[in-house]
Amino acid sequence: MSGTLESLADDVSSMGSDSEINGLALRKTDKYGFLGGSQYSGSLESSIPVDVARQRELKWLEMFSNWDKWLSRRFQKVKLRCRKGIPSSLRAKAWQYLSNSKELLEQNPGKFEELERAPGDPKWLDVIEKDLHRQFPFHEMFAARGGHGQQDLYRILKAYTIYRPDEGYCQAQAPVAAVLLMHMPAEQAFWCLVQICDKYLPGYYSAGLEAIQLDGEIFFALLRRASPLAHRHLRRQRIDPVLYMTEWFMCIFARTLPWASVLRVWDMFFCEGVKIIFRVALVLLRHTLGSVEKLRSCQGMYETMEQLRNLPQQCMQEDFLVHEVTNLPVTEALIERENTAQLKKWRETRGELQYRPSRRLHGSRAIHEERRRQQPPLGPSSSLLSLPGLKSRSSRAAGGTFSPPPPARRASAGPAPGPVVTAEGLHPSLPSPTGNSTPLGSSKEARRQEKERQKQEKERAKERQKQEKEWERQEKERQKWEKEQEKEQQKQEKERQKQEKKGQGRKLSLRRKADAPPAPHDGGDRSSAAEARQDAYF
């Protein structure tokens, strides 16, 4: 029964869920479906007014109707709306559009069912089955042992091991797939998981975890800029980044943050890519270890790791976290530059990577641009006659076997056929029956789009330069502030040592006075007192 859905279904009963056995059935769930646990939202959170929520839903529906245009021409607006938070009613659809998993699903009809029917590797299936009950046990979808949530999770993870046999299964994939299952059906969640593993976080879940180790070095280099004090403390304590950031990055903070913050981070992650994960981690470390006062309680490695396991609640709150993340100037260009530097160091010290994943794409726009390069759309200047199916007929026409136009076209008076018309950017098409030698499509639209694209590239370059200058300015101010803090701390330490020395001098003088005998009243007493002091001295 090991590694089969039947073994999971055997545990299902009408009253046999974990939540009911543990007495959680009497408790109400929060608005996210949690029955309890650390991610249970007990207090009432600030909710968006109904009219504002409805307006946001209408805006997202309008974007869905012209998605390609919004991604290519108005991506900054899409990014802003993702940062504000995707409406909960449209979150599943938005994640699929942002990750392009919707198109992947449409291109592979029946593939998920085919993978589901295929026999999997028993080695992976046993591990998957053992991990199912560990995924969000306090959520109503996964609380029942062998329930529908756990069965769907098993189906997704098994299908992925068959779809990517070179990667197999990694335990960090289970919470990621579980979060997707909370919002969409199993098949849609599977293709969304494929995009996360292939496009957003390539190599994270492969054997050896080399990609996450490399990103750990990148993160530590970025931490030196974002919070030199935290960077210096972790380096002094010899705490490797992999010890604390592995679960953050591989689970996309699904097991670390409050659930409202998790959803906001995922909204931004699907839009902007892995830089959001780096920013969130930098914000958490800056507000946990980024000041002298906070480091006083983290004198050793054990205390520091305990502090990183119990992050301050204030820095994890939804509004505060999103504000800090959006204002942190960590760009894709900066991450790629650090990636190049750290990869060079890796090769010098450890040799070549054993696993070479595909190129990482930074968010939905990069995925959209890659898709356009692989499948260039038929533009307004493209002639149907230049398609591959009609190209051969064009070559036959050039050899003298061209069939005449239809009778109605031939009977109409018109100018003689002109030279061969060439559709812009494509192969030559058939001679134009109307004799018009101009391209069938206008090139003005193409030139306008090219100018628009160049303009957007210049704006993005200016924005990156502006962010980097702001980063350098903030770093200089932070270093100046830290130097002042260190000077103040040294001054206080010197003052404290001075006071201690004074205190010790006073104690010594008092002790000497207490040990000294009383002054004699006559000469005999003085001589005896002098002899006594001499004996005591020697």
Image (cartoon, rainbow, N blue to C red):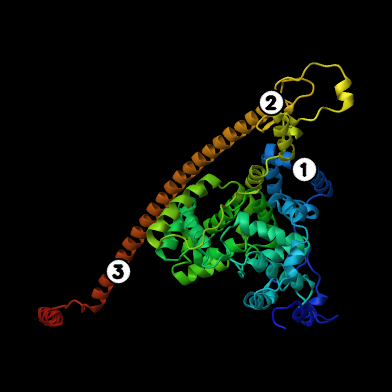
The residue carrying mark 2 is 443
The residue singled out by tag 3 in the image is 504
Q: Position of residue 106 (x, y in %)?
A: 77, 53
Cα gap from disc 2 to disc 1, whole angstroms: 27 Å
Identify the residue at horizontal 75%, vertical 81% (top origin): 7
Dot 3 falls on a residue whose secondary structure is: helix
Label 1 secondary element: helix
Spatial separation of the CA atoms under disc 3 and disc 1: 75 Å
Q: Amino acid at mark 3?
A: Gln
The answer to which image quadrant residue 529 occupies is: bottom left
Identity of the residue drawn at 75% across and 79% down: 8
Q: Locate residue 410 relative to residue 319 in the image: left or right.
A: right
Type of the residue with mark 1: Met
Residue 525 spot, x, y in % from top left:
13, 81
Report the disc number at residue 63. Answer: 1
Q: Is residue 311 visible?
A: no
Give the CA distance from mark 3 to mark 2: 90 Å
Residue type pointed to by label 2: Ser
Image: 140 above or below 443: below
Return the x and y of residue 177 as percentages of the image width and height.
Answer: 69, 65
